Image (spheres, rainbow, N blue to C red):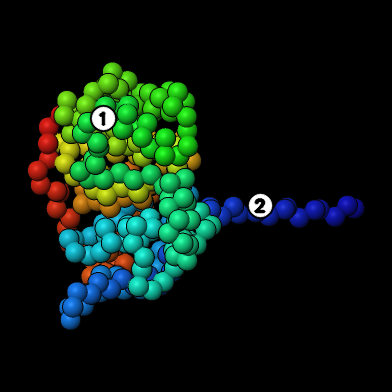
Amino acid sequence: MDKLTPPVELQRITPAKAVVASGIEMIFQSGAERFQALRGIELEIFSDDLELLMGPSGSGKTTLLSILSGILTPTAGTVELLGQEITGLSRGKLAKFRLKNIGFIFQDFNLFPALTAQENVEAVLNLKGIRRQAAKHQAQQLLEQVGLADKVKSLPRDLSGGQKQRVAIARALAGSPRLIMADEPTAALDSQNGHAVIELLRKLAKEEDCTVLMVTHDPRIMDVADRIVYLEDGMISPQAPHFFPVADGASSS
Protein backbone atom coordinates (compact mmCIF):
# COMPACT_ATOMS: atom_id res chain seq x y z
CA MET A 1 0.00 0.00 0.00
CA ASP A 2 1.43 3.31 -1.04
CA LYS A 3 2.12 5.82 1.65
CA LEU A 4 0.19 9.02 1.37
CA THR A 5 2.42 12.01 0.67
CA PRO A 6 1.86 14.68 3.29
CA PRO A 7 0.60 17.98 1.89
CA VAL A 8 3.29 20.55 1.19
CA GLU A 9 2.84 23.51 3.49
CA LEU A 10 2.28 26.67 1.54
CA GLN A 11 5.02 29.20 2.05
CA ARG A 12 3.78 32.39 3.61
CA ILE A 13 4.86 35.45 1.65
CA THR A 14 5.94 38.34 3.85
CA PRO A 15 5.25 41.79 2.38
CA ALA A 16 8.30 43.92 1.67
CA LYS A 17 9.03 46.75 4.07
CA ALA A 18 9.13 50.17 2.44
CA VAL A 19 10.07 52.04 5.62
CA VAL A 20 11.84 50.86 8.77
CA ALA A 21 12.52 53.35 11.57
CA SER A 22 14.50 52.21 14.62
CA GLY A 23 15.02 54.09 17.88
CA ILE A 24 14.14 57.50 16.44
CA GLU A 25 14.77 60.37 18.87
CA MET A 26 14.50 64.05 17.96
CA ILE A 27 15.59 66.87 20.23
CA PHE A 28 15.30 70.53 19.29
CA GLN A 29 17.47 72.97 21.21
CA SER A 30 17.47 76.77 21.22
CA GLY A 31 19.90 78.24 23.73
CA ALA A 32 19.12 76.72 27.10
CA GLU A 33 15.70 75.51 25.92
CA ARG A 34 15.53 71.81 25.03
CA PHE A 35 12.48 70.05 23.61
CA GLN A 36 12.24 66.35 22.83
CA ALA A 37 9.82 65.95 19.93
CA LEU A 38 10.22 62.19 19.39
CA ARG A 39 11.01 59.46 21.90
CA GLY A 40 12.23 56.06 20.71
CA ILE A 41 10.00 55.61 17.65
CA GLU A 42 9.95 52.08 16.20
CA LEU A 43 7.97 51.81 12.98
CA GLU A 44 7.64 49.50 9.97
CA ILE A 45 5.58 50.39 6.89
CA PHE A 46 4.88 47.78 4.24
CA SER A 47 5.05 48.32 0.50
CA ASP A 48 1.89 49.34 -1.39
CA ASP A 49 0.07 50.38 1.78
CA LEU A 50 -1.66 53.65 2.58
CA GLU A 51 -0.72 54.44 6.17
CA LEU A 52 -1.72 57.39 8.32
CA LEU A 53 0.17 59.23 11.06
CA MET A 54 -2.45 60.73 13.35
CA GLY A 55 -2.38 62.48 16.68
CA PRO A 56 -3.08 65.81 18.39
CA SER A 57 -1.17 68.97 17.53
CA GLY A 58 2.37 68.83 18.89
CA SER A 59 2.48 65.03 19.00
CA GLY A 60 5.41 64.85 16.56
CA LYS A 61 3.64 63.76 13.36
CA THR A 62 5.20 66.24 10.95
CA THR A 63 8.60 65.90 12.61
CA LEU A 64 8.46 62.13 12.12
CA LEU A 65 7.33 62.48 8.49
CA SER A 66 10.23 64.89 7.86
CA ILE A 67 12.71 62.40 9.33
CA LEU A 68 11.26 59.46 7.40
CA SER A 69 11.56 61.43 4.17
CA GLY A 70 15.12 62.55 4.85
CA ILE A 71 14.33 66.25 5.30
CA LEU A 72 15.42 66.16 8.95
CA THR A 73 18.21 64.10 10.52
CA PRO A 74 17.20 62.47 13.83
CA THR A 75 19.16 63.07 17.01
CA ALA A 76 19.38 59.30 17.38
CA GLY A 77 18.17 56.22 15.50
CA THR A 78 18.14 55.03 11.90
CA VAL A 79 15.77 55.16 8.94
CA GLU A 80 15.76 52.61 6.13
CA LEU A 81 13.79 53.35 2.96
CA LEU A 82 13.33 50.71 0.26
CA GLY A 83 16.18 48.71 1.76
CA GLN A 84 18.58 51.69 1.86
CA GLU A 85 19.63 53.21 5.18
CA ILE A 86 19.43 56.96 4.63
CA THR A 87 20.58 58.34 7.98
CA GLY A 88 24.24 57.81 7.07
CA LEU A 89 24.10 59.15 3.54
CA SER A 90 25.94 62.31 2.50
CA ARG A 91 23.80 65.32 1.54
CA GLY A 92 24.43 64.74 -2.14
CA LYS A 93 23.55 61.04 -2.08
CA LEU A 94 20.49 61.71 0.09
CA ALA A 95 19.27 64.39 -2.33
CA LYS A 96 19.65 61.98 -5.27
CA PHE A 97 17.85 59.20 -3.37
CA ARG A 98 14.95 61.48 -2.49
CA LEU A 99 14.66 62.86 -6.02
CA LYS A 100 14.48 59.35 -7.45
CA ASN A 101 12.31 57.61 -4.87
CA ILE A 102 10.13 60.09 -2.93
CA GLY A 103 7.27 62.33 -3.99
CA PHE A 104 6.01 65.04 -1.63
CA ILE A 105 2.51 66.48 -1.21
CA PHE A 106 2.16 69.57 0.97
CA GLN A 107 -0.85 71.03 2.74
CA ASP A 108 -0.41 74.44 1.06
CA PHE A 109 0.30 72.93 -2.39
CA ASN A 110 3.68 74.71 -2.89
CA LEU A 111 3.05 75.33 -6.58
CA PHE A 112 5.10 77.86 -8.54
CA PRO A 113 2.59 80.71 -9.11
CA ALA A 114 4.11 81.83 -12.44
CA LEU A 115 4.05 78.32 -13.96
CA THR A 116 1.08 76.52 -15.48
CA ALA A 117 -0.13 73.23 -14.06
CA GLN A 118 1.80 71.38 -16.75
CA GLU A 119 4.97 73.41 -16.15
CA ASN A 120 4.79 72.73 -12.40
CA VAL A 121 4.87 69.00 -13.12
CA GLU A 122 7.46 69.35 -15.87
CA ALA A 123 9.83 71.12 -13.48
CA VAL A 124 10.23 67.97 -11.38
CA LEU A 125 10.64 65.76 -14.43
CA ASN A 126 13.39 68.08 -15.71
CA LEU A 127 15.19 67.78 -12.37
CA LYS A 128 15.07 64.02 -12.82
CA GLY A 129 16.88 64.30 -16.14
CA ILE A 130 13.90 63.73 -18.44
CA ARG A 131 14.21 65.67 -21.69
CA ARG A 132 11.87 68.48 -22.56
CA GLN A 133 9.50 66.78 -25.01
CA ALA A 134 9.27 63.60 -22.94
CA ALA A 135 8.71 65.66 -19.78
CA LYS A 136 5.93 67.62 -21.51
CA HIS A 137 4.20 64.42 -22.60
CA GLN A 138 4.54 62.78 -19.16
CA ALA A 139 3.26 65.91 -17.40
CA GLN A 140 0.16 65.91 -19.60
CA GLN A 141 -0.43 62.22 -18.85
CA LEU A 142 -0.07 62.76 -15.11
CA LEU A 143 -2.50 65.68 -15.10
CA GLU A 144 -4.95 63.56 -17.10
CA GLN A 145 -4.52 60.78 -14.53
CA VAL A 146 -5.62 63.13 -11.72
CA GLY A 147 -8.57 64.46 -13.73
CA LEU A 148 -7.07 67.75 -14.94
CA ALA A 149 -6.66 67.17 -18.68
CA ASP A 150 -8.50 70.45 -19.34
CA LYS A 151 -6.35 72.48 -16.90
CA VAL A 152 -2.82 71.84 -18.20
CA LYS A 153 -2.37 75.49 -19.28
CA SER A 154 -3.98 77.01 -16.18
CA LEU A 155 -2.01 79.01 -13.64
CA PRO A 156 -2.47 78.18 -9.93
CA ARG A 157 -4.45 81.39 -9.37
CA ASP A 158 -7.09 80.11 -11.79
CA LEU A 159 -7.51 76.75 -10.03
CA SER A 160 -9.68 75.77 -7.07
CA GLY A 161 -8.16 74.34 -3.90
CA GLY A 162 -9.00 70.80 -4.96
CA GLN A 163 -7.51 71.34 -8.41
CA LYS A 164 -4.31 72.78 -6.94
CA GLN A 165 -3.96 69.73 -4.71
CA ARG A 166 -4.41 67.43 -7.67
CA VAL A 167 -1.66 69.30 -9.52
CA ALA A 168 0.49 68.77 -6.42
CA ILE A 169 -0.29 65.05 -6.52
CA ALA A 170 0.57 64.87 -10.23
CA ARG A 171 3.86 66.61 -9.46
CA ALA A 172 4.55 64.17 -6.61
CA LEU A 173 4.02 61.28 -9.06
CA ALA A 174 6.49 62.68 -11.59
CA GLY A 175 9.14 60.09 -12.36
CA SER A 176 7.17 57.25 -10.69
CA PRO A 177 8.51 57.47 -7.11
CA ARG A 178 7.97 54.42 -4.91
CA LEU A 179 7.15 56.48 -1.82
CA ILE A 180 4.66 59.32 -1.43
CA MET A 181 4.94 61.47 1.71
CA ALA A 182 1.91 63.70 2.29
CA ASP A 183 1.50 66.33 5.02
CA GLU A 184 -2.20 67.14 5.64
CA PRO A 185 -3.11 66.91 1.92
CA THR A 186 -6.85 67.33 2.54
CA ALA A 187 -6.76 69.94 5.33
CA ALA A 188 -7.68 72.89 3.11
CA LEU A 189 -10.26 71.04 1.02
CA ASP A 190 -14.02 70.75 1.25
CA SER A 191 -15.75 67.39 1.52
CA GLN A 192 -16.09 66.72 -2.21
CA ASN A 193 -12.49 67.63 -3.09
CA GLY A 194 -11.14 65.93 0.01
CA HIS A 195 -12.89 62.69 -0.94
CA ALA A 196 -11.51 62.86 -4.50
CA VAL A 197 -7.95 63.30 -3.20
CA ILE A 198 -8.38 60.44 -0.72
CA GLU A 199 -9.59 58.07 -3.44
CA LEU A 200 -6.73 59.07 -5.70
CA LEU A 201 -4.13 58.38 -3.01
CA ARG A 202 -5.76 55.05 -2.23
CA LYS A 203 -5.63 54.10 -5.92
CA LEU A 204 -1.94 55.01 -6.06
CA ALA A 205 -1.13 52.67 -3.21
CA LYS A 206 -3.09 49.75 -4.61
CA GLU A 207 -2.58 50.06 -8.36
CA GLU A 208 0.65 52.00 -8.95
CA ASP A 209 3.19 50.10 -6.80
CA CYS A 210 3.49 53.10 -4.51
CA THR A 211 3.55 53.33 -0.71
CA VAL A 212 1.71 56.34 0.73
CA LEU A 213 2.46 57.74 4.17
CA MET A 214 0.24 60.59 5.24
CA VAL A 215 0.06 62.95 8.22
CA THR A 216 -3.54 63.94 8.80
CA HIS A 217 -6.20 65.06 11.25
CA ASP A 218 -8.91 64.18 8.73
CA PRO A 219 -11.24 61.38 9.92
CA ARG A 220 -12.57 60.97 6.35
CA ILE A 221 -9.37 59.09 5.46
CA MET A 222 -9.49 56.59 8.31
CA ASP A 223 -11.81 54.14 6.52
CA VAL A 224 -9.56 53.76 3.47
CA ALA A 225 -6.22 53.43 5.28
CA ASP A 226 -4.47 50.08 5.63
CA ARG A 227 -3.16 51.10 9.04
CA ILE A 228 -3.25 54.09 11.37
CA VAL A 229 -0.26 54.96 13.56
CA TYR A 230 -1.19 57.20 16.47
CA LEU A 231 1.37 59.54 18.01
CA GLU A 232 1.04 61.23 21.38
CA ASP A 233 3.76 63.15 23.24
CA GLY A 234 6.38 62.04 20.71
CA MET A 235 5.64 58.33 21.12
CA ILE A 236 3.56 55.77 19.25
CA SER A 237 0.38 55.20 21.21
CA PRO A 238 -1.24 51.74 21.37
CA GLN A 239 -4.64 53.35 20.99
CA ALA A 240 -6.14 56.52 19.56
CA PRO A 241 -6.34 59.68 21.65
CA HIS A 242 -9.88 60.76 22.37
CA PHE A 243 -10.49 62.81 19.20
CA PHE A 244 -8.91 64.30 16.10
CA PRO A 245 -10.49 67.62 15.07
CA VAL A 246 -10.92 68.30 11.36
CA ALA A 247 -8.65 71.13 10.22
CA ASP A 248 -10.35 74.52 10.07
CA GLY A 249 -10.64 76.65 7.00
CA ALA A 250 -11.79 74.13 4.41
CA SER A 251 -12.13 75.86 1.06
CA SER A 252 -14.73 75.29 -1.60
CA SER A 253 -13.93 74.24 -5.13
Q: Amino acid at mark 2?
A: Leu
| Sequence-wise first label, 2 or 1 | 2
**Is 90 located above or below residue 156 in the figure?**
below
The image position of residue 51, as x and y in percent, is 36, 51
Residue visible at 38% across and 74% down in the picture:
76
Mark 2 surroundings within 10 Å by alpha-carbon count, few (fewer than 14), some (14 through 19), many (20 or more): few
Q: Residue furthest left?
A: 249
Q: In the structure shown, which secondary structural element does the residue marked by tag 1 occupy? A: loop
Q: Is residue 226 left or right of residue 155?
A: right
**Is 223 located above or below residue 203 in the figure?**
below
Task: Check whether the beta carbons of the residues at disc 2 and disc 1 lie within 8 A of each other.
Answer: no
Q: Amino acid at mark 1?
A: Leu
Residue visible at 31% across and 47% down in the picture:
182
The image position of residue 171, as x and y in percent, is 35, 36
**Is 204 located above or below residue 41 in the figure?**
above
Q: Is residue 73 visible?
A: yes
Mark on residue 115?
1
The image position of residue 108, as x and y in percent, is 20, 43
Query: What residue does disc 2 label?
Result: 10
Q: Closer to the observer: label 2 or label 1?
A: 1
Q: Residue furthest bottom?
A: 32
Residue visible at 23% across and 40% down in the picture:
109
Q: In the structure shown, which secondary structural element does the residue marked by tag 2 occupy? A: loop
The quadrant the C terminus occupies is top left
Q: Is residue 66 left or right of residue 90?
A: left
Question: Foreground: 152 or 222?
Answer: 152
Mark 1 surroundings within 10 Å by alpha-carbon count, few (fewer than 14), some (14 through 19), many (20 or more): some
Residue visible at 21% across and 52% down in the picture:
217
The image position of residue 23, as x and y in percent, is 40, 72
Q: Is residue 127 left or right of residue 189?
A: right
| Quarter occupied by residue 53 | bottom left
